[in-house]
Image (spheres, rainbow, N blue to C red):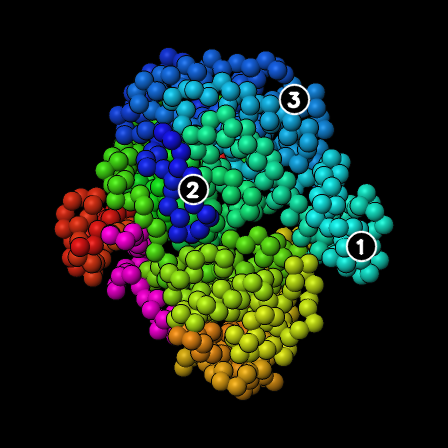
Amino acid sequence: MPRKTPTALSVWRPLNLDQFLLGAPHYPEHVDESLRQRDAERLAASGANTVRMGEFAWNIWEPMEGRFSFDLFDRAIAVLGKEGIKTILCTPTATPPRWLTVNYPEVLRVDANGRVAGHGSRQHADTTSPVFRTHSRRITRAMADHYRDNPHVIGWQTDNELNTTASESYSASCRLEFQKYLSHVYPDIHAVNHAWGGHFWALAYDTFAQIDLPRQMAPGFISPGHLQDYHRFLAHATAMFQHDQVEILRAINPDWFIFHNLGNLADIDFRGQFGQDLDFIGFDIYPMLYDEFRRTGGLGPTQALHLDLCRAYSGNFIVPEQASGFGSQPGFSTMTPEPGEMRRMALSSVARGADGLMFFRWRPAHFGAEIYWMGVIDHDDVPRRRYEEATQFFGEMNRLAPEILGTHVRMDVGIAGADFDNQEAHKTYPMGMPSPLEDAILLHRHCYTQGIACGFIHPEDDLTRLKVLYVPHWVMWKLEWTARVDAFVAQGGTLILSALTATRDVHNHIPTEQAPVGLSALAGVKVYEFGRLAGPDASGLFPPWPDRYVGAYAPGSVPDAASASRKYRFSFGNQEFTAGHLYEKLELAPGTEVLGQWTNRWLEGSPAITSRKHGKGRVVYVGTYLTPELAAQLAETVCQPAGAVPLLPHLPEGVEVSVRQAEDRVLYFIQNTTDLTVLVKGVVAGTDLLTGQSVAGDLTLASYGCAVVKAT
Ligand code: GAL
């Protein structure tokens, strides 16, 4: 099918496909050929239309340097194609074969301690390596040439979850590439010295060739400018690595769509070149894995958080890997979805912007480091409940696709997100404070639980559809964003700015103006003084040392310290709160109102939270960090009057709701994330598209039950 050129990256952007992709990643190289026909028939019978293949099979595509072999995949693609199943191919660069790492050992990734990656798992090659890039281009071209006219191959995934296992490299060639990058970005070495603060600790360089990678054994803390540029460089190198592949694929067949399956966003600037090169984003979803690893508050909010973060970069997306069952690698394992939960989690993905979804994986592997990562079909080739649920879900999506495609996810409360520089700026200088994301999660989780339409958005995106925009401690505020938020407020929006916003420039320098720089006129406040407080649930100031480079803040992880008793309190909306992490003493411009005040110690009586009217809207400034209680109060006192109210009046615990809409339709996605039957009251009048039944008022959802109500 001819490819439709995607529109500019935006959280509101629909996918540029007319079809809802449904299927599974498939590994024909892992199973006996005698099973292929039945696989194809079962896939077709389930309602699937697509498989993804080949991302780890470089040793099969190119068993010896320059000698290619396509037979195995040609046959697999043809058998599937005959049953109507299309194939997405992947460039196999996540797993270079052994001959490559033997013949070109310089492509191996090197860690911060100088240890060279061995051959034995995956993502062991250094994507910054020019030699590896040459091989990546070679294999991409060979595969693309071979499949140029294959009618069953419809698109490509680049690599697999770039940077998920490791994103940094400290190899000799990486150092050279870093120096080269800097010499393009900066006019001369003096500019680097200025940016990194060369006169601080005598760090200045005489030439680009003297510059090192920022190693942990520095042995003290690295200059934030140096660290920030290293991560900008890694993001640039990752984008260039992918760009090579995209250029080749587009030139060979312009009708193929191209995406990447993100696992996390380490050193990927998706709103930059990386995302601009692609048709859409793919985001792999393993809610049970994330929840256990990151302890983010339960399956429902965790999945919603990941999806909302991902959508902020580029709008609707596909899920190339959605957890189907129990999963494990040798060192960990996840909980197991209960009956009905696999479909529920899939519908939760659709509810938050998935316009295509594949269950990981069609069959489990019988060997290797993921033998217990279950698939849709079991090891003994018997389709059981996961096949039934996949079949049910695929059938439902095939029916609902015309309603769902073309809609965007409603968002009343937008949290500023998707900004690579601010994410990295925090990491260069975390000070044991929550990152912007760690702070924002508190507001996101509150909105999720209350059923308020909330997500993430970049300030350069279209803000007009929001009611509220919350900016979580973005230290690097670009001056050109001020005009955008000014217009948003003037037209009736509510902007909430939080402590430390707009306090550094792009080099992590602190400007000489009073904070928030570029925003103080709009907010009607200036920061007179700021100071550190213990986290509300912590007893001291420091994160554990090993985490000091990544900035993970660990509540309660250190023994009692005197600072713990220094609780600063403030009042806001008839309640008193204990402040967490930071206080700011604010100076107000005439006309700025006080919404909350500090109520004890030396700050007693000073404003803590302010509001300034501007045009039809207002700017609220919060001179501290969020706590769960403050997030709830902000939602009630600031978001609700701005029109950001729950989508349903009575959301029972464990039920989630979100809305996808287009000009002519509004779809309420309601999912029961619990194993108990629940009664949802006050549901809008309409038709549940999953059952065809009309709904108005009460809706009973059985264990993991879901409804997609099209409002009349
Ligand atoms: C993903 C990855 C897959 C597989 C899966 C389960 O992150 O892309 O290849 O490893 O996790 O572990």
The percent coordinates of residue 234 (x first, y second) are 64, 43
Is the shortest distance between ligand 1 and the CB of mark 2 under 8 Å?
A: no
Answer with mark 1 or mark 2, whichever residue precedes in sequence. 2
Frontmost residue, 569 versus 57: 57
Q: Which residue is mark 2?
A: 6
Q: Which residue is mark 1?
A: 190
Q: Considering the image in quadrants, where does the N terminus appear?
A: top left
Closer mark to the observer between disc 3 and disc 2: 2
Answer with mark 3 or mark 2, whichever residue precedes in sequence. 2
Q: Which residues are magenta?
A: 637-664
Q: Which residue is mark 3?
A: 100
Above or below for 149 versus 570: above
Name the quadrant containing residue 402: top left
Identify the main secondary structure in magenta.
Answer: loop
Determine the CA span between mark 1 and mark 3. 40 Å
Asked which secondary structure carries label 1, the reply is: helix
The percent coordinates of residue 631 (x first, y second) are 44, 68
Query: Is residue 284 in view from this perspective?
Result: no
Q: Residue at x 43, y 61 (%)?
A: 463
Asked which secondary structure carries label 3, the reply is: helix
Frontmost residue, 72 versus 411: 411
